[in-house]
Structures are given as structure tokens and as C-alpha cells.
Image (cartoon, rainbow, N blue to C red):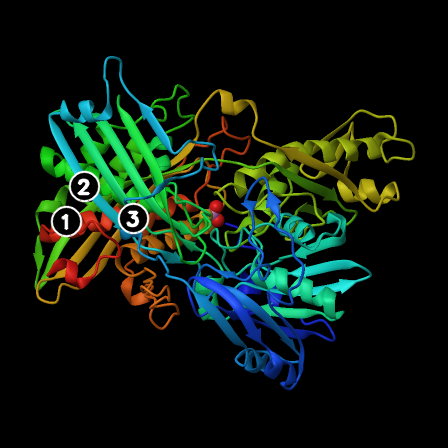
Amino acid sequence: MTMRTDAPLKTSGAARYGLDVTPPGTVYGYVVTSTIAHGEITAMDVAAVRAAPGVLAVYTPFDPLPLRTPMSPLLGETWVPLQDTEVTYYGQPVGFVVAETFEQARDAALLVEVTYDRRPARTSLHAGLADALDAPPSLHGEPPTLQVLADGVESIEDALAASAVRVDATYETATQNHAAMEPHSAVAVWEDGRLTLYSGTQGSDLQAAQLAQALDVEPARVRALNPFVGGAFGGKGHAGVSAFLGAAAARDLGRPVKAALTREQVFTATATRPATVQRLRIGADADGRLTALAHDSWSSTTATPSFVEPTSHGTSREWYTTPNLAITQKMVPLHVPPTTFMRAPGEAPGSFALESAMDELAVALGMDPVELRLRNSSIAPPGRDLQWSSKHLDECFTLGAQRFGWAQRHRRRVDRDWLVGYGTATAMFPALRFPCAVRITLRPDDTAEVATSGADPGTGLRTVLSLFGAEALAIPPERVEAALGDSTLPPGGMSGGSTATASVGSAIAVGAPAVIDALVAVATGPGGLFEGREVAYADGRVFAEGDSATFGEVLRAAGRDEVTAIGTSAPGEEMTKHSFSSFGAQFCEVRVHRWTREVRMSRMLGVFDAGRIVHEQAARSQIMGGMIWGVSAALHEGLEIEESGRPANGDFASYLIPVNADIPTVDVEFVRYPDTLHNPVGARGLGEISVVGVAAAIANAVYDATGIRVRRIPIVLEDLL
Ligand code: MOS
């Protein structure tokens, strides 16, 4: 297997991230954040700041940097800071201090005196449930209410009431924070009215487009670079505060500006996964076949509603077959930090509720939870006609159950002082792809370049580009260089929605034949090595009868520096023929200490059906990371917001995440069925699905071990007393 191409750079520290760039004359920006959750800024005294050593500028809502609100078809509106005096959450950016050094900027920022007209803050999701609002339609255009009823059924309540076995339970999930290893940051440089921005994001062309709009300059005058990204997961889709303020200040001052949020600031000045409350009502017949399913969901959102966690939509998009389905999706505007996409938005917290409820149903039926899931497996999304292009969820469960020893689950209940429990859950995440363009270039030294703007936020996309390029050109991957993370390259969409592999693969499948045609034209054209002859391309060579040459030789003979072609691709006709999703089965074993009630993970297995697995190691690593995030969601992670709106645990000293000692061996397996109905390379998304179902599998295992059903994550000791 080919090693990940960026592995030596990353492990040796040679990879240069956005913030590692320090152009000559760089000055440093430091963001000032609010200390109330709701109110109006009536005054900001910055006299002491201006007098502080090294300070070059102080920007506030009273002396702002002009920024417009960018709008993108993929992401919607992006919030820009300092444009008004209203404060709607604690930790909101309200000022920006620029000084000669980072330390001077930070010290001066402490001298800002803000006067507020404080208003009551609303921070409790629970208190807001009663007057929740309908969510706006989801990104996929789904309305906040959906209902599918069988003929003759009047209401979902009737369908539930008529069911032989019923579950009715309410679940809660916590707000989670986007604290990627690389904090949100940017370095902005202006030259001749052109901006170059170095900043880790999920799509360099998206970032450039947002900045161009915000700064009101022509898109061609903004170049965004993100060769390496230290984690993103949805939190670096929108351009961030550091990028907007850094770029605008750099223009104002005529100096390069470097700005990074501190770890603590990342907890409020970026965006979070919403907290949710979800009520699940499931009805089934005595054989465990679902007769009715209702999923009502409430999501926290910002005071000016932003992203809503589409948990109910997940249930209606992919999950079990049922004649009667009803979902509602509501939001509760609060004075909390902005909300946004986070790994498997919708499905991650949604699966905790749905897959816990399915486990409760299995218990009520006295049925094996694996069997219950197999029995209700869908051939199409609920209430829709288009069948799945390729679905091997049953095999994930049967293979997983065998490998995990699921049948043994009732044998060993106790191991010394530890109560042992097994849990399982389904994982699903829609298979999507985005419009994408990839440029393929053949060079005289017999190497090729595959280039697209995009981003590799640690997923291995750079390696995937090389592999697909090599495959399409029939040459070794070592001879294919990937160029990525530069908005001036052909637009590659974003690393988000688990789309990137399918998107770039589809574009390469179009671009490679085109570049080969261009090569053949050079070989057979005037002055070409095989002028006027019949030729064919194979294995990096052009063959004429009785003769052949490498593509490099063909180019050299013609005096050409390169031949190049751009392949573009977008979702198309396939969308009218099938539905597309990745699938998986999660299994885990937990130990709950009999006396202390500590929960330890002892084994984890995930088996996934994600079409073709392109790079074994990258795929495995992604899945492992997501499964570990699932442990974090179940047992560790959650932002606690005090009544005042201040996060009680807004830093890594108190915001729990798992460490190595919390994680057992993570066993990952794939069933491998290339899905060429979805795209020519047959790979479906496998990033986000990894986290889906894990928290439910763990809660189900905790129930299996203790008989205690915990319907709120993270699970804490007190839940098990
Ligand atoms: Mo993802 S939440 O689309 O990065």
C-alpha cells in the first residue's frame, strides 16, 4: 500500500500550516471577546490600548473594519464581526487589537474597557422547548415537518396507538465544541490590491469567495492557500473571524497581519454543534416490524437563528422502513455561541436517540437488537421510491456480529468488579458529491500533476488525488503529484459532507481521458514523434505500430512543457435513478465498575459499507477517529453553558475528551462493494459515518451491563448510581 504522501511531512514537522507563514513586516492581531451573553455595547474605552507599547490599531464596532456579510450557495450566510454593537453570546468577538508582536497585542487587548447595557440572557434549551420555532428547511431543502402515512391511517398517533409494542422516550445530547488541533487562524498579505490569505479551511475556493465578498473586492484578487489543515470537521467551512479581521486590518494598515484565536477563544468565537432534545416514538408489531416512527427534535441555535442540527431529517433520509413516519424539526434560539456543522451533522446526535430507542424496542420485544435492525432494513429511504444503489448493511451486521462474538453477550456478565455489557447500533450517512473540477497535467519528466483547489483536512485527500490520477493514467502513484489547497486551482468544492473522494474521483475520470487525447494529438500532430500515425495510450506510454515512447518523451520530442486538461463533474442523472447512502454496524463492549460506576470501553468494532475503499490506511484512520469521537460524545464531551451564558468548561482544562487510556483497540472492517452507480470510481463517503451510532451502541451496552437506561449524553457517574 502506498504511504500517505503527506505522512513524512506531518510526522517530521515539515508540513507548513497557514499560521507557520510569517511574511516580512508581519504584525499581530488579537481578538477581544464579550464578557456578557446578551446586551448592547454602549461604549468602548480604548485610550489605554492605543497608548500601549507596539499597538498599531484598535478596531471596535465604533471604529470598525468595513465587512459585508458573504453569502454562498453551499454554506449560506457567514457572520462577520464588529459590524454592530449588539452582543448575543458570551465570548463574541467585539474588538481587534493589532500590534508589532503577539504579546503586545494580547497585553493591550486586556486594557479594552467595554460598557454594556446588559439584557437578560436565555441559555437553557429546556426552558425554550415550549415556545420553540419551526426550523427553516434543511440544506437538502427538507421542510421542518414531514409525514408519510399508510392508506387509511389518519395520524401518526393513530398508527402508534394501533401498534402492538411501543417505545416513547426522550433523549438529550450536549453542545460540542470545534476545538481542532490547529486553532482557527489566518495570515493576510496585500500586494497591489491583491490579498493572499493563508488559513486552514475546508475549501480554499470557498474561503476566497467569502473573503472577496466580505472585503468587496473582485474574486480574482483574492488567493486563499491552505496546503495543510490541522483538523476541520465542519468547523472550518465558513471563513472565520481571524480571516475576516486579519484581512481587513492588513488592508487598512498596509502590513501583513497574523491572527489566531487562543484555545479558549475557539470555544466561543467559532461555532459549535447544537445541543438537542429528541423524542422518539416507535411502534412495532409483535414480530418487530416497525409500524410507526415519530421523531421530534429540538436544536439549540443562536439568537439570530443559524444552523439547526437536522436530527429528525436524518431519520427521514436514510433509516428504517416503516409505513408511517412523522418528523418535526424545531429550533430554540438562545444566547449561546453560533452553531454549525460538525461531523455527521444530524445523524451523529440523531442516531443516539433513534438507535437507543431501537434498543429499547428490542428489549420490549425480547428480541436480539441485531435481528431487530436486520428485520427493518430499508431498500429505499422511508417514504420514497428510489432504491439504494448498493446496500450491504446486513452483511455489516452478520460479519460484525461474528467477528465481535455477539452471540456470547449473555455469557460473561461480570469480570471481577466490572459489569460487562454489549451494545450495537446502525450507522448511516448519505452518500453525496459536490461539483468539482480537477486539472491533470502531463510533464516532460514523465510525472503528472493532479490539481484542485479543495483542502485536505487530514483525511488523506492529497493521497487519494495521487492514487486516482495514477489509476486513470496507468502510471505509478509516485509519479503523480497532487496540488491542493490553493483557490487559484480549478474549483474542487470542499472537504465536507464526506464528499471529497467521490467528487475528485468523478472529475479525474473525466479529465484523464481528455489529457490523454491531448497527448495523442501532440504525438500524432505536426512535428510529433508519431506524426500522422495510428497510436494508442497505455501505461504511461504512447504506442504506434512497432514503436512506443513514454509521454515525457512525446512531450520532449515536440518541445512541449506540458499537456493539460480539466475534468469537471457534478451530481447528475444518477440522482433520478437511485438513492445513495453509506452504511455500517457498530459494536462495543463496556465495563461499568460495580462500586465506582466508572464506565470503561473494552472493545469496539465498526463494519462499514462505503463502496470502494480507495486507501486502506486513510480510510481506517478516518473511521477510527470518528469512532473515538463517538466515545467522546457518549462518555466525555459536552459544553456546559452557565445561566449567565458563560461556558463553564470552555477550555481543554475542563472540557473532557478521551485520551489514549480511554480507548481500547478499535477494530475497523469494510465490506467492499464499489458503487459505480454513484460515481465512476465507486467510492462513497466514509468520514462522517464513523461517528454515527457509536454513542447509542455505548449507551445500549451500559444498559446491557447495568439495566440502567441513560437517555442523555455524555453519560456521567451520577447517571449510574
Ligand atoms: Mo463536515 S460536518 O461536512 O465537515
- Counting from the top left corner in percent of width and height, residue 620 is at 41, 50
- Image quarter hosting the C terminus: bottom left
* Number of marks in picture: 3
Between discs 1 and 3, the one toward the N terminus? 3
Does the residue at mark 1 contact the one at mark 3 (Cβ under 8 Å)? no
- Counting from the top left corner in percent of width and height, residue 640 is at 32, 62
Q: Residue at (18%, 29%) from the top-left corner?
A: 283
User: Which amino acid, mark 3?
Assistant: Val
Quarter of the image holding residue 591? bottom left
- Residue on which disc 3 sits: 694
Label 2 element class: strand
> In the image shown, does 288 or 590 lie closer to the viewer?
288
- Residue on which disc 1 sits: 709
The residues tagged by marks 1 and 2 sit, at their Cα atoms, a distance apart of: 11 Å
- Asked whether the viewer can see residue 182, the reply is no
As drawn, 571 above or below 215: above
The residues tagged by marks 3 and 2 sit, at their Cα atoms, a distance apart of: 19 Å
As drawn, 373 above or below 52: above
- Residue on which disc 2 sits: 169
The residues tagged by marks 1 and 3 sit, at their Cα atoms, a distance apart of: 16 Å
